[in-house]
Image: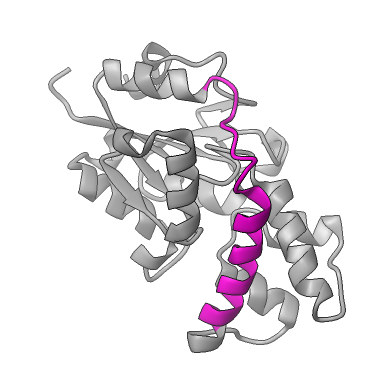
Amino acid sequence: MSIKIAAIFDMDGVICHTNPYHSEAFRIFFSRRGFIPTDAEFAEHMFGKSNSYILSHFLKRTIKGDELKALEEEKEGLFREIYRDKVTPLPGLIDFFYDLKACGFKLGVATSAPFANLDMILKALGITGLFESMLASEDVIYHKPDPEVYLKSASNLGVSPDCCVVFEDSFSGITAATGTGAKVVGILTSHQPAELPPCQLYVPDYTTLNGEKILDLLS
């Protein structure tokens, strides 16, 4: 195919089902401060959100600057400690990556998590070299649902946004991807389709996907 095409993946809930471990880390983090949010609060205000939003929401004041960096590092350090020896890709993902490459897709990853998390997970899975673009929270000014991270990913890959397929699991992430004109595959690790914006396709994992099926989304 002469037209450049790309597949761009969120990380948490898309490459690995990390949300339970983020929840565990946040529970420890917040318990140190005397409270524990409910599962419903986590589902609404954590999954797919930036740490700036999460911390400001639950601590009920604006968290920014040096305080944000310090609190984020505490929480994300807890997550990395908990998850470091448990890194596991979603079923079918690694084979799917190689099939996408064989079909001519460039690959990118675009996460709201800090780069230290992204680096740990991609290295643990041995797939860092598959990606031509890797963006984390430090690489953007505006976080999802703003489309900046996906627009920047498409630019890094040299691909028009409407020739990209984005893989996302959260309301804010799908909103960000849709805002670029990309096609979107909803990964159902944390939500059901009725809880998410419209996507071209919804799947629980990658076992039913292949490169040809993703090409069809762009045709």
Q: Position of residue 44 (x, y in %)?
A: 73, 58
Q: Position of residue 203 (x, y in %)?
A: 60, 25
- Pick out the residue farthest to the left: 2
Q: Which stretch appears magenta?
A: 68-92
Residue 82 sits inside the magenta stretch? yes
Residue at x 36%, y 50% (from the top left corner): 150
148 lies above or below 197: below
Whether residue 177 can be seen here: yes
Q: Position of residue 136 (x, y in %)?
A: 41, 58
Q: Main secondary structure of the magenta part?
A: helix
Residue at x 37%, y 56% (from the top left corner): 149
Q: Nearer the viewer, residue 46 or 25?
A: 25
Residue at x 35%, y 39% (from the top left corner): 128
Q: Position of residue 153 (x, y in %)?
A: 30, 49
Quadrant in the rendering for residue 6 = top left
Whether residue 10 can be seen here: no
